[in-house]
Amino acid sequence: YESSLDACCERYFSWDIYTCTGGSGTVPVGFYPSWGSGSETKCFNSTETAKTLPDYMRQNSEQWLDSDIESCCERYFNWAYSDCISVSGGSPSAPATGSWYMNHQKEICQQDCAKESDGPCGGLAKSWNTLYETAATCCTENFSWVTSSTCEARSTLTTVVGTSQWYVDWTLEKCVKECNDSSDANCGGLAKSWDKLYGSSSTECCERIWYIERDECTVE
């Protein structure tokens, strides 16, 4: 016989002490990493999330648990330290600036704010990220191959509408407008960064393909 339920569970069901004790077992105090909880870089408070505290951490809490959020984030998620502190309920030492930095993989600019916030937040900027005052400036400086208006719209999560200016579609050998309006036959979609945009009238654009008859320069 064992002297207590905890002792019995420890001896015979050490792989699942929490279930054995019916949730009444002693819960070590501290913060532990959210491994197994998706890709979230977060530390949990063991006294608030006892059910998800792995038994191997419960049994060896001195090795796995840290006394505060900062220590836990530094130990287990040092590459995303500020984000970890923010989503774990702490106060990051480097507050969000609201400025913009580039995400080269997604070819957009993201805002320096916690991912839990609404809008175009990309998480707190890292020390190596160059910050820009606006999304437009960030797009212009980093994504020269993407039309600035397109990059800015994607970065700010707004609809990409185009400029309604004209450019040459060399496949059609016609001038088309930069827009996505299906009701307008002259809309040719969004221009690429290498497409020269002309004014709101097709005249100047049509002069670029001078060898095409003027009345055949546009779709209609």
Image (cartoon, helix red, strand yellow):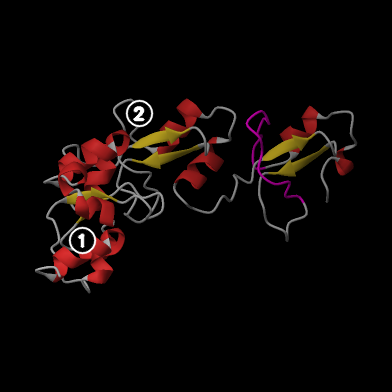
* Residue 135 visible in this rendered orientation of the protein: yes
- Of 216 and 110, nearer the camera is 110
Residue found at x 16% / y 40%: 71
Along the viewing direction, whichever of 188 and 116 lies nearer the viewer: 116
Horizontal side of 200 relative to 97 (left or right) equals right
Q: Nearer the viewer, residue 42 or 112?
A: 42
Q: What crowding class fits label 2: few (fewer than 14 Cα within 10 Å), some (14-19), or many (20 or more)?
A: few
113 to the left or right of 61? right
Which residue is farthest left? 3
Return the residue at label 1: 10
Quick one: 106 or 155, which is closer to the camera?
106
Image coordinates of residue 47 in percent, x first then y, are 15, 61
Residue 70 part of the magenta segment: no
Give the mark count.
Answer: 2
The local crowd at label 1, few if under 14, some if 14 to 19, many if 20 or more residues have their Cα within 10 Å, is some
Q: Amino acid at mark 1?
A: Glu
Looking at marks 2 and 1 on the same chain, the residue that comes earlier in the sequence is marked by 1
Which residue is at a point 43% across and 33% down the rendered structure image? 102
Say whether residue 97 is visible. Answer: no
**Tag 1 secondary structure:** helix
Looking at the rendering, the stretch of residues picked out in magenta corresponds to 186-200
Query: Residue reaching furthest bottom?
Result: 22
Q: Which residue is mark 2?
A: 129
In the rendered image, residue 164, in percent from the top left (x then y), is placed at 63, 46
* Residue 15 sits in quarter: bottom left
